[in-house]
Amino acid sequence: MTPETGREAECWIKLSLLTVLSVPEILRLLQQTGGVEALFDASSGTLTKLAGETAAREIREVNSSGEAERILSWLSETKGVGFITLADPRYPRLMIEAGAAPVLLWYRGDAGLLAKPVLTVGGSTHPDREALYNAEVFGEALGTRNELLLSTGHFPGTETVFLASVLRTGGRALVWQPCGPDRVWPSEGRDLIMTAVAPGFGFSPEGRELQTCCRMASAQALLALNAGTGSHLFSLARTAADWGRDVMAVPGSIHSPFARGCHRLIRQGARLVESSDDILAELRLAGS
């Protein structure tokens, strides 16, 4: 939940603006000072002793900059937007355990959906006809499974078609955005994103690298619908493997350049899947 008091919310926003402290260091400081409000009320001497001179200087600068107050004012005037903090019980535990947990996650929609198992789905940004057909078919099949939350980065091409297909079935979607909650990326996908906000929700970490990191950290598994040999999905798959997440891939024609990436993932150990039932079995959700 967004913090109940204006002062607490303001302090959490200030905490998210810090750049020199890691999340583990921030959590340690919160424990040592007694909470987020107490951290920003602490004296310069106390902050220097606990966090070092550089961090103490940045905390003082952020505290007096007025930036958090501006963001809080925007938040109070904007409907349907909120944030969850590291202290919120809804914050994805998988992200915290992976060490990929921003101080705040901004969202539009129902953040309570994060209690569901998350499957992140990706594919080529320039798919062929077969790849688009698979994206639509898998979107329709998986969108009817209420026990699963489907996640994308809303890249053009495969992921956009998959997301639209999920929403047509009344399914739920988690759409990671590489920008702040006041913008939508890509801009031409705004209508689809705003449609997703009603039945699903979107989170907004700042920056493409952080978007990719959060997207994989929050998920139990990665599903590659299609991919070329230079696909962005390879970095997602490497991250998934590093964190012990399952990787699944849909095979395609040996003549299609958009299937070669999936075939390569399968050779490297990804599970070959041909239907939504295969995916649910891999996630141990079959029959639930």
Image: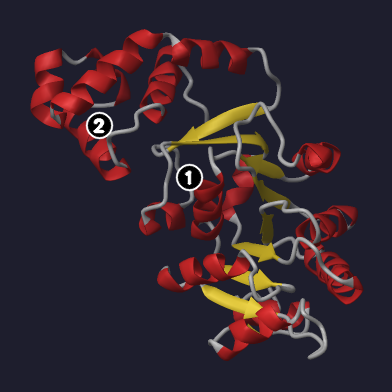
Real-space CA distance between mark 1 and mark 2, rounded to the nearest whole angstrom: 17 Å
Q: Which residue is mark 2?
A: 30
Nearer to us in this view, 260 or 18: 260
Is residue 174 visible in the rendered image? The answer is yes
Nearer to us in this view, 20 or 82: 20
Residue at image position (69%, 59%) is: 150
Q: Is residue 248 above or below residue 101?
A: below
**Crowd class of label 2 (few under 14; some 14 to 19; many from 20; radius 10 Å):** some
Q: Is residue 171 above or below residue 8?
A: below
Q: Is residue 38 above or below residue 27?
A: above
Q: Amino acid at mark 1?
A: Tyr
Q: Which residue is mark 1?
A: 91
Residue 286 left/right relative to 45: right
On-image quarter of the C terminus: bottom right
Residue at image position (44%, 23%) is: 13
Earlier in the chain: of badge 1 and badge 2, it is 2
- Give the label on residue 78, or none: none
Q: Amino acid at mark 2?
A: Leu
Residue 78 position in % (x across, y down): 68, 18
**Crowd class of label 1 (few under 14; some 14 to 19; many from 20; radius 10 Å):** many
Residue 164 position in % (x across, y down): 85, 54
Q: Quadrant of residue 163?
A: bottom right
Helix or strand or loop: what does disc 2 sit on?
Answer: helix
Scheme of colours in the image: secondary structure
Residue 216 position in % (x across, y down): 53, 60
Residue 74 left/right relative to 213: right
